[in-house]
């Protein structure tokens, strides 16, 4: 397995948009790590994504977009309506 390339400034929200060895988003020089550090970076990214999803879920509940069933699970208050066009 080769080296993993990433932007140390943008990680864990690295968009993998690189130009000439630099991050196209922030301009930081890219970093390269081996497999063990790559796994650690992916674990960090997983944890940060889980945190962000939890916060987004709570915001939807706080703003009334999601409600709670009696079993404690969230469900949408809004429903999609499908309309057939003639």
Image (cartoon, rainbow, N blue to C red):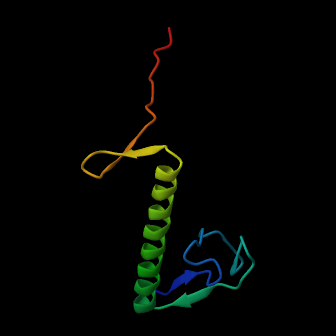
Q: Is residue 53 left or right of residue 26?
A: left
Q: Is residue 4 above or below residue 73?
A: below
The answer to whether residue 36 is left or right of residue 12 is left
Tell me what residue is drawn at x 44 percent, y 79 percent: 42
Residue at left offset 72%, top offset 82%: 28
- Relative height, residue 39 to residue 14 (above, below): below
In the rendered image, the residue lying farthest to the top is 86
Q: Is residue 1 visible?
A: no
Provide residue 86's location: percent of width, then percent of height: 50, 8
Quadrant where the N terminus lies?
A: bottom left
The residue at the point 51 percent across, 90 percent down is: 33
Quarter of the image holding residue 22? bottom right
x, y percentage for residue 46?
42, 73
Residue reaching furthest front? 70
Q: Nearer the viewer, residue 8 or 70?
A: 70
Residue 23 position in % (x across, y down): 69, 76
Examine the rendering and report whether any part of residue 69 can be seen: yes
Task: Give the total number of marks visible in the rendering.
Answer: 0
Residue under the image location 45 percent in, 90 percent down? 37
Left/right of residue 79 with respect to residue 63 in the rendered view: left
- Quick one: which residue is furthest to the right in this view? 27
């Amino acid at each position: 397995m080769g080296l993993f390339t990433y932007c140390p400034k943008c990680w864990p929200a690295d968009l993998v948009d690189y130009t000439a060895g630099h991050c196209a988003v922030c301009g930081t020089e890219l970093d390269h790590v081996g497999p063990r550090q790559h796994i650690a970076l992916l674990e960090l990214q997983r944890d940060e994504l889980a945190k962000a999803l939890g916060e987004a879920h709570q915001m939807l509940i706080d703003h009334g977009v999601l409600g709670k069933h009696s079993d404690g699970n969230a469900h949408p208050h809004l429903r999609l309506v499908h309309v057939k066009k003639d």
